[in-house]
Amino acid sequence: MSEAGNSVSGVSPGNADGETAAVLRAAVRAAGAGRHAEAIGLLEAGLVGRPDDLDFRQNLALILALAGRRDEAIAHLKRALAARPEAEKATMTLGGLQTEAGAYADAIATYEAFLRGQPRHAGASKALGLLFVVLGRAGEAVPHLEAALDIRKDDADLLNALGTAYRAQKDNGRAAAFFERAAVAAPDWLPPRRNLGDTLQALGRLAEARVAFAAGLALAPDDAACLCGLAKVEDVDGHPEAADALFQRALALDASDVDTLYQHGLFLRKKCDHARAIEVLERAGALAPRFVEVWNALGTVYSAAKQPA
């Protein structure tokens, strides 16, 4: 569902005609058949005589990216935008490629520069907002996501991202409302169901949380996150045996799921089942040695178990 990272798409001849269109069509056909080198050669040759042709340069960048030559693609897109700052395709592709490369500051600058000229562009606002969510900058994400949602009112990706941003700001009531809207907008999409269940649990609305997780499991019966979420609901609702069974069910599906192991370890620690908690958390630590929270939890369990060393 999410558009994040979907930067390499839309290779097409554009609006060209005559000889230019013929070259572009040939390049697009070659790229579609996986003959990237041939397509790149055609477009590079075309650019020799038409260095300012936006269609040539944008399509060349897209095909270079498809061929794994991201740095060259980025260079062409920057050149295209230097000449045509309003170029939508070049902007969205460049921002996506910069995000994939981990050049987040560059991607932010790309989208912001474009939005200064076209502040009502839903795609750029959405891409920028989603990037801020991923970076944990929820406060900066919200205005961009809301601007995009004002144009795309039933966009489930935007609704889910807004819920995530408000959840990060501990506004769980508003977050739940957005997750509910996302689930309605995309009834077959799992993430809003998970997020809604977690948020409703945080609000103490356990019956509704149980319904949300059950709806998620109806879509994906083997989803560990929904199983763990439902387990936490059962635990808070005073049913530890049911909670333990759900954690065990999730681990039976994937014994190396680190987050499930961690959540199960926390549950066992809470129940003062120190021996099992230590075993589960040690397995999680062995699988993810840089998962700091696991080691912190393991330390507290050893301390509670009177094993200070």
Image: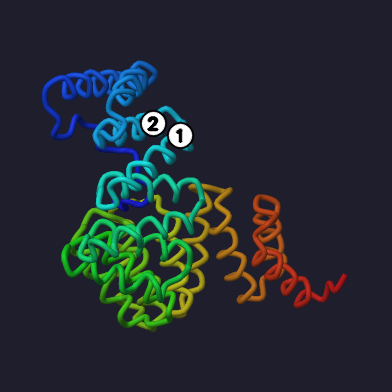
Task: Find residue 72 and name its label.
Answer: 1
Asked if residue 17 can be seen in this view, the reply is yes
Amino acid carrying label 2: it is Leu
The residues tagged by marks 1 and 2 sit, at their Cα atoms, a distance apart of 11 Å
Task: Indicate how the structure is coloured in the image.
Answer: rainbow
Give 92 or 285, whichever is nearer the viewer: 92
Q: Quadrant of residue 174?
A: bottom left
Above or below — where is 103 with respect to 119?
above
* Mark 2 element type: helix
Q: Quadrant of residue 35?
A: top left
Closer to the camera: disc 1 or disc 2? 1
Please give left or right for residue 141 compared with residue 23 in the image.
right
Residue sitting at 65 percent across and 56 percent down?
284
Give 177 or 157, whichever is nearer the viewer: 157
Write down the residue under mark 2: 66
Q: Earlier in the sequence, mark 1 or mark 2?
A: 2
Asked if residue 210 can be seen in this view, the reply is no
Q: Residues within 10 Å of mark 1 (few under 14, many from 20)?
A: few
Q: Position of residue 102 (x, y in %)?
A: 51, 51
Q: Quadrant of residue 14?
A: top left
* Mark 1 element type: helix
Q: Quadrant of the C terminus?
A: bottom right
Q: Position of residue 257 (x, y in %)?
A: 55, 51
Residue sitting at 68 percent across and 57 percent down?
290
Residue sitting at the far right: 309
Give 31 or 3, whichever is nearer the viewer: 31
Amino acid carrying label 1: it is Glu
Residue sitting at 23 percent across and 53 percent down?
188
Task: Find residue 43 and name its label.
Answer: none
Q: Position of residue 3 (x, y in %)?
A: 31, 51
Q: Residues within 10 Å of mark 2 (few under 14, many from 20)?
A: some
